[in-house]
Image (cartoon, grey):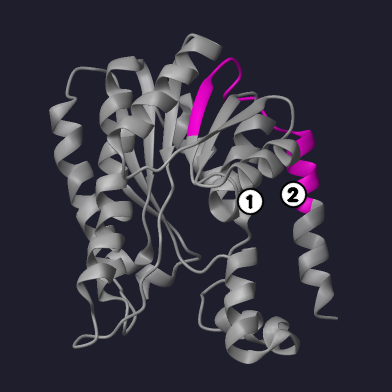
Amino acid sequence: MSLFPAVRREAKQCLRRYEMTRSLEGKTAVVTGGASGIGLAIAKEFVLNGADVVITDLQQEQVDAAVAEIGPKSSGVVANVAKLADMEAVYAQVMARHGRLDTVVANAGIGAHAPLQRITEDEFDRTFNVNVKGVLFTVQPALPLLKPGGTITVIGSTASIQPPAGMSLYGGAKAAVRNCVRGWIQDVKGSGIRINVLSPGAVDTESLRRAVALAQGADAVPAAVAKMGEGNPTGRIAAPSEMGTAAVFLASDAASFITGVELFVDGGMAQV
């Protein structure tokens, strides 16, 4: 019986794909950290809605596998978002291949699990280098290439307002980029460029299931994932594709008067 809700969700997703509006037709998007998890799901949804997508990630093998999975309207570049030169090179390749840039999803990020009194200098530097500096270096060189109507979506987290115990570094970094966006929308005033934050809660990704398997064993994964959703008002955690459809909305003209928001795509967890 526990399989039926998942089957119904999959059926609804298939129906939605048949009814999709192609709201990103003709647009070119960059999705950082796009070789797996939420980034991969966003890239897939962008392509389903008509966009050409360029993903970035750290390993060529992972980038190639993701491009093969996403399909012919995608391509990939190996880049480290924490290095400005890498991201400048990414955008140079995007303009050479496509001649335009319409939307950017700053998704690349890392988690950090360390309680106070056990946080190391290396953990602090890595977390803020990727999750904060990496977002800045994704956004800043894209701005001169975006035209009016262009969009930037920063992937945040419910940890920006509700960091679990032991995740103060991660929550602090996500709160930092949320406040950066508050300032950036004023810096780009009059440009026609919109910048928003999309903040997921728990998402049923392969990396989450691997982490559970390492901590509790492979046999415990289904029950552990189900338990994660028990406290959610929806009674479950999110599917990766649900982050993708929210990102499509923020990048589309349907969200033309939405900028500076933090959209919690978390089943209501940030509200209770």
Q: Which amino acid type is shown beneath numbered disc 2?
A: Gln
Quadrant in which residue 6 is drawn: bottom right
Q: Quadrant of the C terminus?
A: bottom left
Residue 174 percent coordinates (x, y): 29, 59
115 is within the stretch colored magenta: no
Residue 124 percent coordinates (x, y): 23, 67
Q: Which mark is residue 241?
A: 1
Residue 153 percent coordinates (x, y): 39, 39
Where disc 1 sits, the SS reads helix
Of residues 109 and 27, the one nearer the viewer is 109
Measured along the vertical axis of the image, is residue 85 above or below residue 33? above
Measured along the vertical axis of the image, is residue 119 above or below residue 249? below
Report the residue marked by disc 2.
13
The residue shown at (71%, 43%) is 65
Task: State left or right for residue 201 relative to residue 7.
Answer: left
Q: Which mark is residue 2?
A: none
